[in-house]
């Protein structure tokens, strides 16, 4: 794939697009890079291809060289890829041809010091393949990270942890039993999703265990707020087609308590995945934290999904308290009716939100979640 134009000194900014393979250049779907990556493996023609990572993670099969007088990525010896997993100090980066274990250049770590993970799953990065003493190029060093959209973050000790970047949906998974749902944890995830500009979807798994209908009733609360909801069971198969359709062609993250069946759901919608699945301890009704690291999984139906380890609690210290009311969507139309313009909806008289709880416009559990997030953002849920 030599290209004479790239080695000339640039006269004026110009865009050089190099057709890589015509039948691969139509972008049927925006977020199709994983499928294309899989196809690329099949065709074995991409050894020297350089690819451009586009908005929301789709890898283009054309090369686009934006030449602003700076050297192109390729000329600087850099490749683009997507981080599919973090392993200690290593990030596994998929450039569409293979997975490169990469370290993160110290200067980048320093620049992004406030974050626990300057690079995280879903990030689009530029990396430099580095030769070992043997001359074999197997690893890389991440030199740069592209701007993120759609991030799921939480506080981890004194640092802000970005669990995953560049996703469209957070699928908040609970289970009808073993363990029972925690409405407050669902609300925390919904707030975090809105704060990170991701669309939350509320999923109730293990519907085969919903004997008295309470899990269905809980989900109804979220459907009434216009959140997309899903009822699933890997035992009866209910809702699995709907989940597959939801995830197709999108970037999503599955989150929730340990043991609710996140990995089981992914195994069920894509047989052959063989993610590890754990038993729920009888005594405590707690999951066993079977999944230990977040991992990005390409889907056969296009798009990708990130399976995350279950959480016990969700520290929301990082969310701006003044913004929390905006993330409770049923509060938004009521807030202008509060007596005080800076009403926190906790202690004040004449509060339209508290009146809404009285009148039934606001569910008391939702209001309780709001108060807990503001008063005790770090609390175990
Ligand atoms: N009854 C029932 N059990 C299920 C269902 N889905 C999963 N399970 C069981 O729930 C247990 C936990 O499943 P996992 O898929 O490991 O749960 P997880 O959410 O990935 O858990 P972590 O990885 O620890 O966060 C396993 O024993 C599964 O067999 C379901 O729909 N119904
Ligand atoms: Mg799991
Ligand atoms: Zn108020």
Image (cartoon, helix red, strand yellow):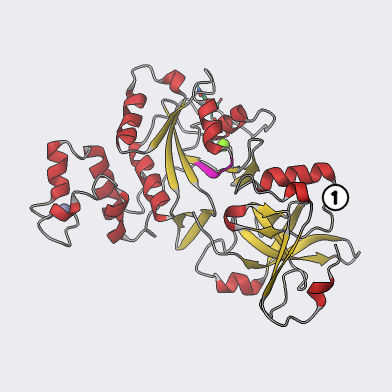
Q: Measured along the vertical axis of the image, is residue 77 above or below residue 303?
A: below
Quarter occupied by residue 120: bottom right
Extent of the magenta region = 249-254
Element on which disc 1 rests: loop
Determine if the magenta segment contains residue 204. no
List x then y, in percent, for residue 358. 12, 39
Question: In screen coordinates, is 299 left or right of 314?
Answer: right
Quarter occupied by residue 224: top left
Q: Main secondary structure of the magenta part?
A: strand
Question: In screen coordinates, is 208 left or right of 191?
Answer: right
Q: Callout 1: 10 Å neighbours few (<14), some, many (20+)?
A: few
Residue receiving disc 1: 45
Quadrant assignment for the N terminus:
bottom right
Determine if the magenta segment contains residue 252. yes
Of residues 279 and 255, which is closer to you in this image? 255
Q: Measured along the vertical axis of the image, is residue 341 above or below residue 192?
A: below
List x then y, in percent, for residue 69. 69, 80
Quadrant assignment for the C terminus:
top left
Name the residue located 13 percent from the left edge and 53 percent from the top edge. 337
Of residues 82 and 260, which is closer to you in this image? 82
């Amino acid at each position: 794939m030599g290209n004479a134009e790239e080695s000339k000194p640039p006269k004026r900014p110009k865009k050089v697009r190099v057709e890589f393979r015509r039948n691969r250049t139509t972008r049927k779907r925006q977020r199709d890079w994983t499928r294309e990556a899989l196809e690329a493996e099949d065709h074995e023609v991409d050894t020297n291809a350089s690819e451009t990572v586009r908005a929301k993670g789709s890898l283009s099969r054309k090369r686009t060289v934006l030449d602003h007088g700076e050297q192109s990525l390729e000329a600087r010896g850099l490749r683009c890829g997507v981080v599919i997993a973090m392993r200690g100090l290593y990030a596994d980066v998929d450039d569409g041809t293979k997975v490169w274990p990469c370290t993160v250049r110290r200067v980048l770590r320093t620049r992004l010091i406030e974050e626990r993970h300057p690079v995280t799953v879903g990030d689009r990065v530029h990396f430099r393949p580095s030769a070992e003493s043997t001359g074999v190029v197997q690893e890389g060093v991440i030199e740069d990270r592209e701007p993120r959209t759609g991030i799921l973050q939480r506080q981890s000790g004194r640092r802000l942890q970005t669990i995953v970047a560049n996703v469209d949906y957070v699928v908040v998974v609970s289970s009808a039993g073993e363990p029972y749902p925690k409405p407050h944890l669902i609300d925390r995830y919904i707030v975090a999703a809105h704060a990170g500009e991701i669309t939350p979807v509320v999923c109730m798994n293990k519907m085969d265990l919903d004997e008295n209908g309470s899990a269905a009733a809980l989900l109804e609360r979220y459907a009434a707020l216009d959140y997309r909801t899903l009822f699933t069971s890997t035992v009866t198969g209910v809702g699995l087609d709907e989940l597959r359709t939801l995830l197709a062609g999108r970037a999503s993250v599955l989150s929730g308590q340990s043991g609710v069946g996140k990995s089981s759901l992914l195994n069920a919608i894509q047989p052959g995945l063989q993610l590890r699945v754990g038993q729920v301890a009888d005594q405590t009704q707690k999951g066993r934290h079977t999944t230990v690291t977040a991992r990005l999984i390409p889907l056969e139906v296009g798009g990708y999904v990130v399976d995350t380890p279950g959480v016990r609690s969700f520290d929301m210290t990082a969310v701006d308290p003044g913004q929390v009311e905006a993330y409770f969507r049923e509060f938004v139309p009521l807030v202008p009716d509060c007596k005080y313009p800076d009403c926190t909806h906790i202690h004040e008289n004449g509060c339209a939100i508290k009146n809404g709880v009285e009148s039934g416009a606001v569910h008391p559990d939702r209001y309780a979640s709001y108060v807990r997030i503001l008063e005790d953002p770090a609390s175990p849920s």
